[in-house]
Amino acid sequence: MTTQDQRPVLVVGAGPSGLTAAVELTRRGVPVRCVDRAEGPSTSTKALGVWPRTLELLRRMGADEEIRRRVLPQRALRYYSDGRVIADLHFRDPDVQPVCLPQPDVESMLRDALAEAGGQVAWGTELVGFQQDGPVVKAVVRDSDGTERTEEFSWVVGADGARSRVREHLDIGFEGATHELSFVVADVELDGLLEPDVTHYFCSPRGILVTCGLPSGRFRVFTSAPPGLRRDEVDLAVVQNLVDERGPGGIGLRDPDWISVFAVHSRHADRTREGRVFLLGDAAHIHSPAGGQGLNIGIADAHNLAWKLALCWHGRSDATLLDSFESERAQTARAAIKQADIQTRIWLLNKPHQVALRDNALRIASALRLFHLDYLPWLAGQRTVYTQPGSRRRRFALPAGRPWPGSGGFAEGGLVPRRPIWDTTSSRRMPLRSALSDLRYTLLLQSDGAPCSRSAQLAAWVRDQCAETVEIQVMQTRAGTLRPWTPERPAAPRSPDTTRIALVRPDGIADLVCPARESWRVRRRLEELFAPLLTPADTPEARVDAL
């Protein structure tokens, strides 16, 4: 796709993933039509846990002040077995600390961000069907008054939930399993001594009980339903009995504003792309709420797709860039489904030897802070790693997400470190990842002094050929500063030359990491990404012809 397609992108669904896609596309200059068949926003609290990586994305969309005003930071996860504490996981590092932020608040922030960017949601508007015709998707849309009309779009994003109309229309399978037990959830006033900023997990042979405070001062109570319990039998008295049976005692519930019963599914779509149509969030995968990943993964899905789609829509990159969306997000979805399924099964263990093994394992892991090494950073979204067939990291079989020796903490396919730096552009200290652009790629030259001649030559080429899509920054590692690159006399050759180069994507993922002597790898990668922008004399084909 080498010329701009003026048709808008259709986003179906105005939940967290759909709104994120609409916001990110709109702020990148792509016209969006966001529709939802509901008559207005949902007031159901649904998801609660928001992890740091998701907060980072929301702040990029302008929600920083609202986040501070609305959230309840979580201090710890605490596990009990028959009323006794067996593990206490404290969030001492803000990079792994989640917050309680109910889904309606997240959606409200995203709607505000969409309005600020110049977009809006068309409520009461339903997608009836669509067909793909070359570079066009022709969709039949029904308004709230029943009027139907056919509209043309360049792409369609299906973010319309677990019962996705988009997925069904494409006849894409949604395979998986349903847990044997159902679960009861209630938002209530709670009288007792439970700390609201701690998520409490009460495990017992009688079932799992989870409680956490809400920013409103109320509590969320989540517990497994006894076998045979019908939906129409569940009221506050039933929930209170379950809490008395499984909790620490002395907890009273009153004034519920939401009580529901639901089954837990672990399902994923057979594929999340069909031509010019994509699936995001619950339309692509659903799983147990264990670990609080659902909303977070949906937002990450949307962000991953949106920046790639924007580059293609503007004709700045070939549409093959979109091929990575399905493989990358499938890796994350599979890991989340597996983790949530394992945790749910661990919750429900009831045989004595299984309970003893679980409790001892949690005690040891808690005492040695093993969860802080990998599990909590993974939950927090800080260990996102995309592996590609034949990648250098895979060839050398380094552990997922671990930086290479001499890479400055960067790992190909992994997030850029959040080490603090002094950003000369904004004149303030901030995490490196936050200082890099989220609208363009970044060519990051890391050196103790001035960039070496190889990296300076690469930077000059990028400035001449890719200025629309790549900004150039210099990180002086010893001083801990970040500044825009300007043409200057390169540093005298050193032995050894320690200048390093990282090509960073708009989502903060290190696309490529290499020493300056391999700068040709970066140029080749940029030629693959942005061939439509290069002058004819600088395209790979032209150089082959010249040879």
Image: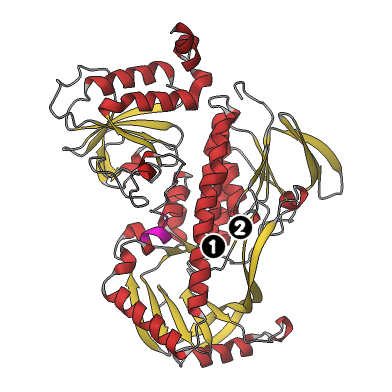
Identify the residue under disc 2. 285
Q: Is residue 40 left or right of residue 179?
A: right
Tell me where residue 352 sits by quadrant: bottom left
- Residue 73 in percent (x, y) is at 40, 65
Q: Is residue 209 left or right of residue 376?
A: right
Amino acid of disc 2: His
Q: Residue at x 52, y 43 (%)?
A: 304
Amino acid of disc 1: Ile
Query: Dot 2 surroundings within 10 Å: few (below 14), some, or many (20 or more)?
Result: many
- Residue 498 in percent (x, y) is at 19, 32
Callout 1 secondary element: helix
Check the image and report above or below for 490 versus 264.
Answer: above
Identify the residue under disc 1. 337
Tell me where residue 199 sits by quadrant: bottom left
Q: Is residue 84 left or right of residue 309?
A: left
Q: Residue at x 15, y 30 (%)?
A: 496
Query: Dot 1 surroundings within 10 Å: few (below 14), some, or many (20 or more)?
Result: many
Asked if the residue under mark 2 is in contact with the one under mark 1, i.e. CB atoms within 8 Å, the reply is yes
Callout 2 secondary element: strand
Is 379 magenta? The answer is yes
Check the image and report above or below for 502 versus 381.
Answer: above
Boundaries of the magenta span:
377-381
Is there any visible trace of residue 7 in the rendered image? yes
- Residue 481 in percent (x, y) is at 22, 36
Q: Residue at x 46, y 84 (%)?
A: 203
**Which is the main secondary structure of the residues drawn in magenta?**
helix
